Amino acid sequence: MKRKCGRRLIQKPPALLRAPSYSRKAHGGHLSVTTYKGYANAADKISPVDVGEDEVLGFWDYEWFLLIIIVSESSGQLKKERKKERKKERKMDVQSAAVAFGSPAVAVAVVGGLFFLFLRIFLYSHQPAAAGNRNHLPTLPEVPGVPLLGNLLQLKEKKPYKTFTKWAETYGPIYSIKTGATSIVVVSSNHVAKEAMVTRFDSISTRKLTKAFKILTADKTMVAMSDYNDYHKTVKRNILTSILGPLARNKHRVHRDTMAKNLSNQLHALASSSPHEPIILRKIIQSQLLSLALKQVMGKDIMESIYVGDLGMTMTREEVFQVLVTDPIMGSIDVDWRDFFPYLKWIPNTSFEKKFEQIVVRKDAVMKAFIQEHTKRIHSRESLDSFIDYLLSEAKPLTEKQLLMSLWEPIIETGDTTMITTEWAMYELSKCPKKQDLLYEEIRNVCGSQKITEEKLCQMPYLSAVFHETLRRHSPVSIMPLRYVHQDTQLGGYHVPAGTQLAINVYGCNMEKGIWENPEEWNPDRFLAENEPIDLQRTMAFGAGKRVCAGAMQAMLIACMSIGRMVQEFEWRLKEDMGGDDNTLGLTTQKLNPMLAVIKPRR
Ligand code: HEM
């Protein structure tokens, strides 16, 4: 068969060679392929734009044509030749072009490129083995894959937690897979996950980030993505002292109370202006969480919009949320094939890098605009007592990059996972009126005619059960950011060699049949059987051990107060046809379709 050369062939592989690919549309649980086109131009629109099928190559397209790309990218000489050839004759393939044009340089480049590639693969796969299995423990069960690609072709979803969970039924709670040249140990059991995060922490305390995460986190400059080292301890102390620790939480109580009040006011306004129209709860919560985070971090919320000087444009609150929270979260599930083939990292993947750099440029531009606003307030001698004031005065000086990341981190952490939990909880309660009634009864018994307050939360076991069951059934972080095994260790009775990556499949842990009865069912009652207060680490949703979520208490207070207040004041029903809609989107498990609910104020 005569092959056609260049982009067309790469973009449209023959049907048989195409991997059983994911759909490119964001419907019915499939993935959407979006790009952030035009970010280089400051005046451009912010929302991600759907692009046509031919414009974007999915990772699976790349797999099959990896070798072609390698050969062609491995030589600058070849690149030039190819450009010339494209102009002259689009139909010729690389090999035949070398012969047809009689260019020995191209042929040499092709052979040289291949030789170089295979040498690198050989050297990579013959690296000295790790220290060895001195305890003679069994080696991990392996999920069979294919040479070179390992299990990549079996991982069709970008968020493979469901596939990992299915494999656990065959290969057990801990097994190993290969993604290209990288070995990953997957843990889908509560017990083994805790062993990894607590008992064996000393051997698994670092991270190896994907290219996307490296760019987004300015190479581990965030608390949550850093290695466990002195930098981590400094920035974690900062965030605990100023926002998340017990004293800081008390200080920010006023902002959480204001959030609950504003949420209620906004819902009442909507219910009275258009009582039969469904509301999109997500938008309202996002706006309130942005206010709360900005008050904690910068000392002040923005009004309707903010001028972002570096981009030369004014952004609305929704656009700010998009740039600071949604774009980075949605962007970070994108895969750079070089993550799977470290010996190929010398090959440029400029479109991928550019896309992430643009996300970072816009995020940093918005954060700088907030800092400028704050500087004006310093000059006008306002009394200031927020996270930025703490970082600028009391804490160990940070570089500009570290300052920007430190300020941004609580905004994205507050804006995403807490919103996801609250939306899923309200979705489940709206779907099941009986459970909603039980919660309403509890609130009425405890609060009477008073508004729900944080002090009352400890008297409401059903509300707590609703929160924890939502974290279990819809774990916002379905797979923990990968950890790196930096010295030989053991897990679940198996030998785990240094150099392995570790994926803790939180979704799998929370679907473990031996621990949870009918795990697919959302049923808060399962937490009521326990007589003691619910352990925050019971569902693994916040992680465990030294890297356990530092914002768990804040998340619980915000989510429980919001859920409680919304059920106390309104009756919630899903808009028709919204049932059975469990699909998710993004790095965290945001509902694919925003919840649409009709609300009726309670008397
Ligand atoms: C329901 C909401 C939340 C969930 C499910 C959640 C989940 C997690 C998880 C799973 C980790 C551990 C990652 C790992 O071990 O690799 C983590 C870490 C962290 N989270 Fe959260 N989180 C939530 C809300 C928040 C909030 C609101 C904040 C702060 C504003 C926050 C701040 C942090 C920080 C700073 C860390 C890093 C802790 C460390 O590495 O020492 N989280 N979170």
Image (cartoon, helix red, strand yellow):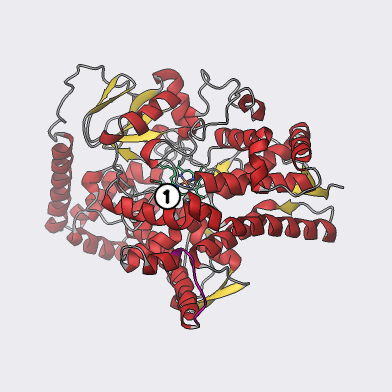
Viewer can see residue 1: no
Q: Quadrant of residue 427?
A: top right
Q: Position of residue 178 (x, y in %)?
A: 31, 32
Asked if residue 382 lies in the magenta stretch, the reply is yes
Q: Residue at x 36, y 59 (%)?
A: 351
* Placement of 195 over or under 14, stated as above or below: above
State the residue in front, 487 or 338.
487
State the residue in front, 495 or 381.
381
State the residue in front, 202 or 339.
202
Q: Residue at x 70, y 60 (%)?
A: 262
Residue occupied by mark 1:
334
In magenta, the rendered stretch is 381-387
Asked if residue 573 lies in the magenta stretch, the reply is no
Mark 1 sits near ligand 1, with its Cβ under 8 Å away:
no
Q: Amino acid at mark 1?
A: Asp
**Total number of numbered discs in the rendering:** 1
Q: Residue furthest right?
A: 603
